[in-house]
Structure formats: structure tokens, C-alpha cells
Amino acid sequence: MKKKIITAGGFIGILFSTWDSIVDHTDSASLSDHMKIGFIFHSVFSLKTLIYLLIGVTSEWIISVMINKISELHQEWNDF
């Protein structure tokens, strides 16, 4: 379960990086410049993608630790 949550966080980080690159490009591109698929793949392998990936993985890891701690506390409360 923990690996699935962390993997989902990394995937969300990559998707957010791709979305951010698309929005940046459309904000600064001229109207005659059409979106090319090569631009998206070029921007996926950037430092920004690595940063978003790490943020996604770290946040999902923290969430999984919190879920584990809450479930442990819930089990202790039920033992009383």
C-alpha cells in the first residue's frame, strides 16, 4: 500500500510538471506557434520535473506515515 501511494505521488508530480510546462508555453508562445509533442517530451526531462517528482513523492510518503500512525492509534484505542 505504501509503495502504491508513493508511486501515485510521483506520477502526480510528473503530470503536474507536464501541465505546468504546457501552460508556460501557451502563455509565452505566439498565436501562430502550435503546440508540438516534442516540446512536451523535452520539458518532461527537466530539473523542474525532478523537483515536482520529489515534492509528490515526499508529500505522499508523509501522508502514508500519517495514515499508519493514525491506524496504530486507532488500534490502541480499541484495545482499551
Image: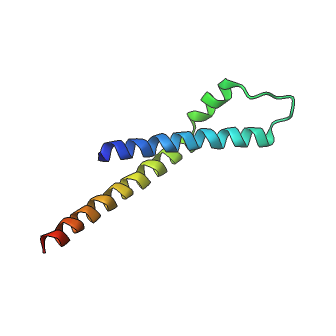
Depth check: give the residue in front, 48 or 40: 40
As displayed, is residue 71 above or below residue 79?
above
Kindly tell me whether residue 50 is visible in this rendering. no
Seen as rendered, the residue at the extreme bottom is 80
Judge left or right: residue 16 versus residue 4: right
Residue 9's x, y, as percent?
44, 46
The C terminus is located in which quarter?
bottom left
Kindly tell me whether residue 73 is visible in this rendering. yes
Colour scheme in use: rainbow
The N terminus is located in which quarter?
top left
Residue 33's x, y, as percent?
82, 29
Q: Indicate the quadrant where residue 67 lies.
A: bottom left
Judge left or right: residue 63 versus residue 29: left
Judge left or right: residue 52 versus residue 80: right
Q: Which residue does the image show at 37% across and 46% down from the upper left?
A: 5
Q: Indicate the quadrant where residue 27 lies.
A: top right
Residue 53's x, y, as percent?
48, 44
**Number of numbered discs visible in the structure rendering:** 0
Q: Which residue does the image show at 39% across and 41% down from the upper left?
A: 7
Q: Which residue does the image show at 18% across and 65% down from the upper left?
A: 75
Q: Indicate the quadrant where residue 70 lies.
A: bottom left
